Image (tube, rainbow, N blue to C red):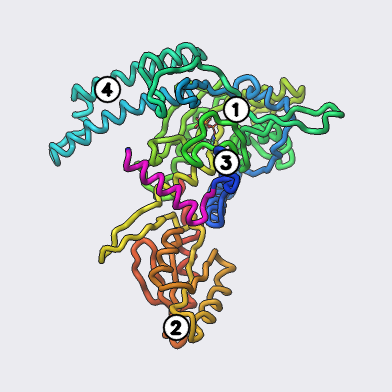
Amino acid sequence: MAQQEEVFKKLVSHCKEYGFVFPSSEIYDGLGAVYDYGQNGVELKNNIKRYWWDSMTLLNDNVVGIDSAIFMHPTIWKASGHVDAFNDPLIDNKDSKKRYRADVLIEEQLAKYDDKIDKEVEKAAKKFGDAFDEQKFRETNPRVLENAAKKTELHTRFAKALNDNNLDELRQIIVDYEIVCPVSGTRNWTEVRQFNLMFATEMGSTADGALKIYLRPETAQGIFVNFLNVQKSGRMKIPFGIAQIGKAFRNEIVARQFIFRMREFEQMEMQFFVRPGEELAWFEKWKQTRIGWHKALGLGDKKYRFHDHDKLAHYANAATDIEFEMPFGFKEVEGIHSRTDFDLGSHEKYSGKKMQYFDPELNKSYTPYVIETSIGVDRMFLSVLAASYHEEELEGGDTRVVLQLPPALAPVKLGILPLVKKDGLPEKALEIMNDLKFEFQCQYDEKDSIGKRYRRQDAIGTPYCITIDHDTLVDNQVTIRHRDTMQQERVPIVDVEAIIREKVSLKVLLNKIPS
Ligand code: ATP
């Protein structure tokens, strides 16, 4: 774990050093859990968004996009349940004065049992070598079984407390399991209280009687309230989906772990409207499609797992998270929820406007059911970076830091490097760049040795570099260098565009997603 924390620290400083992510308002000492994306970060982020958007709107002819406003009528948040129920249970440690989410403290305790089990398995695997039967070991080893039983016991108690909304019981669990504050190391806890996560502001001047409005805590409601607008203007037939990418705001209690938990972040959400009764089949279908979308990136299939919810939200009849193995453990990146007809039904009630769909095949009207896929852009960004960051030992004792980003997501696709800064090589390099820049993001670099320039491109994840040397002026060929293998090959300039395009185009990724 300590080693993973070390890697995480390095990743955070790498993000700053190479223009991916900066703390917001840094010259004023920053602003808690708010971050800015730099010149490389914004490109990577845009590529992630493009990958998601195209997978939704190009690959599904029944999914269309919208871009709704952040400010919305405040009654929307009453109807959605956010005013009354968008709370987290918070607890303070009286010694360190640090604030925590009670549920997260307990989840961390649960994860400790998994860690203990994994350690036993690892130890035994080493001891028994090839003869090791992991499944049998997990089913029979007394220490594994003891920890599994402890985990189940805590899990059952925790799930019940959450479902009953029993704050006293959450505190009691923390006390009974002797959970300590990671900062002070003490068990001097306050009561557990509910805390609403929405940011409120005012619209209009106070003289007019200003309206209290909220910064949206999710983009989904902008989709629900536009359901009929899109259905009618696009003549959409059920089943169909509406996708949206946009900012969301939550006044998170505990906002550590870099861009994993931010107060201002971005979501990519898709609400898929279906016939009542068909929602669970669609839920399964979207689960498979979404995990396929993640795995197509090639970051490692073992890094993903589904985690079904212990406590279903008030609107859901099925829910799962796609978790990714971050440097600080498996964490939610995306939620997939079967939201029933709760949202449309509730907006119908609060607005007094019908939110129904007339199904010509069934010859009747109904309130559609909804499957939601909801993924955080920033968490996705973090997972891609964490899986791509590698420190490599090279021959001759050298080391390099390389971001092995999926080529389609890389901020820069092609580094263009004249071998020397003279003899007409820069001119030739710029000529090539001026041709290719219409196709993909290129970066020209003539400063320092070629080795140093390769390292700089490795550090930002550029999948290919071309070097223009004296022979280029004669034979119109360049050397392409591959980021991951560091292998080099000589190719004609006229072929460069096609070679690179084939490797970096989104199409390659989109093709890998199961339909
Ligand atoms: P968590 O349990 O971690 O607080 P959540 O279950 O509240 O997350 P959802 O409401 O399902 O999250 O939001 C959908 C997605 O939005 C999440 O899977 C996550 O990727 C992203 N997200 C939610 N909150 C944040 C945040 N504070 N910072 C960054 N991304 C977030």
Q: Earlier in the sequence, mark 1 or mark 4?
A: 4
Start-end of magenta stretch: 2-22
Give the residue at mark 4.
147
Q: Kindly report which numbered mark, 2 or 3, lies closer to the viewer in this rendering.
A: 3
Query: If the image is split into quadrants, where does the N terminus sit?
Result: top left
Which of the labelled discs sits on residue 197, or is there none?
1
SS of the residue at dot 4? helix
In this picture, residue 309 sits left or right of residue 353: left
> How far across and how far down the image is residue 252, in percent?
56, 31
Q: Of the numbered discs in the image, which one, if any, rests on residue 106?
A: none
Mark 1 / mark 3, whichever is N-terminal: 3
What's the distance in space between the residues labelled 2 and 3, CA to CA? 47 Å
Where does residue 160 sit, x and y in percent of width and height? 44, 14
Residue 13 is a magenta residue:
yes
- Reading the image, the residue beneath label 3 is 34
Q: The residue under label 4 is which amino acid type? A: Asn
Q: Nearer the viewer, residue 242 or 186?
A: 186
Q: Upstream in the sequence, badge 2 or badge 1?
A: 1
**Callout in the foreground (2, 1):** 1
